[in-house]
Amino acid sequence: DGGITQSPKYLFRKEGQNVTLSCEQNLNHDAMYWYRQDPGQGLRLIYYSQIVNDFQKGDIAEGYSVSREKKESFPLTVTSAQKNPTAFYLCASSVTRDRGIGYTFGSGTRLTVV
Amino acid sequence: GDSVTQMEGPVTLSEEAFLTINCTYTATGYPSLFWYVQYPGEGLQLLLKATKADDKGSNKGFEATYRKETTSFHLEKGSVQVSDSAVYFCALSPRSNYQLIWGAGTKLIIKP
């Protein structure tokens, strides 16, 4: 079955470290997204990509970086410049040809600074 | 710009009660409308959708009707269960592109 796989499910980061969250999809979707969710809060867009080798900043890109070298993969790096990275991170994907389909989400990665 | 407004939570109900979660939107033209559900510790799942005025989306006993005249897409269920406890997100896909604009989410708590 097609879907999105996020790994790891739980991740612990020490102060000053960079960490990378993985997101892989086998849905043949063109667009991919990263969202941050804080406890009791909604979704905030970090980065999105509509095509391989291209991506755009979302509302809260500072302290994060991404790459899109393959259609299937959209990893997110949380850098040491992100001062408050503890949150739940969600990856999603979608087609770009049909706006009536919506997004497919992964199961999320919970990042904790220790 | 385009936007989605949901009723604030948490919404607390007893089992078997009737549920309504309000969602209104601002958009030009005819957006597509969605409801997503997020169970604790999980990602979001598409619950239902509607792509044109007067369409009714339905799934798992939940329903929502696309009302162009009131710019609304309220989520309803006739008899809720404890297992329906989750956060519900309303979203729209504007006429101009495929990207979703999200409401803030409404937390639903069902007590036995």
Image: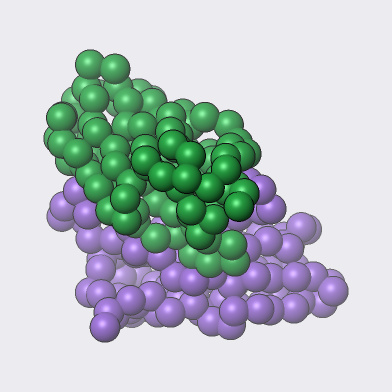
Chain colours: A purple, B green
Seen as rendered, the residue at the extreme top is B69
Please say if B27 is above or below B41.
Answer: above
**Camera sees residue A67:** no
Point out residue B46 in the picture as x, y percentages from the top left corner: 34, 56
Residue B39 as seen in the image, left or right of residue A26: right
**Quarter of the rendering containing residue A88:** bottom right
**Camera sees residue B8:** yes
Point out residue B35 in the picture as x, y percentages from the top left corner: 36, 46
Residue A82 as seen in the image, left or right of residue A75: right
Point out residue B51 in the picture as x, y percentages from the top left corner: 17, 40
How many labels were placed on the picture? 0
- Give the residue displayed 66% in from the left and 48% down from the top: A40
Of the pair A16 and A99, the residue shown nearer to us: A99
Q: Quadrant of the N terminus of chain B?
A: top left
Point out residue B102 in the picture as x, y percentages from the top left corner: 44, 41
Of the pair A64 and A103, the residue shown nearer to us: A103
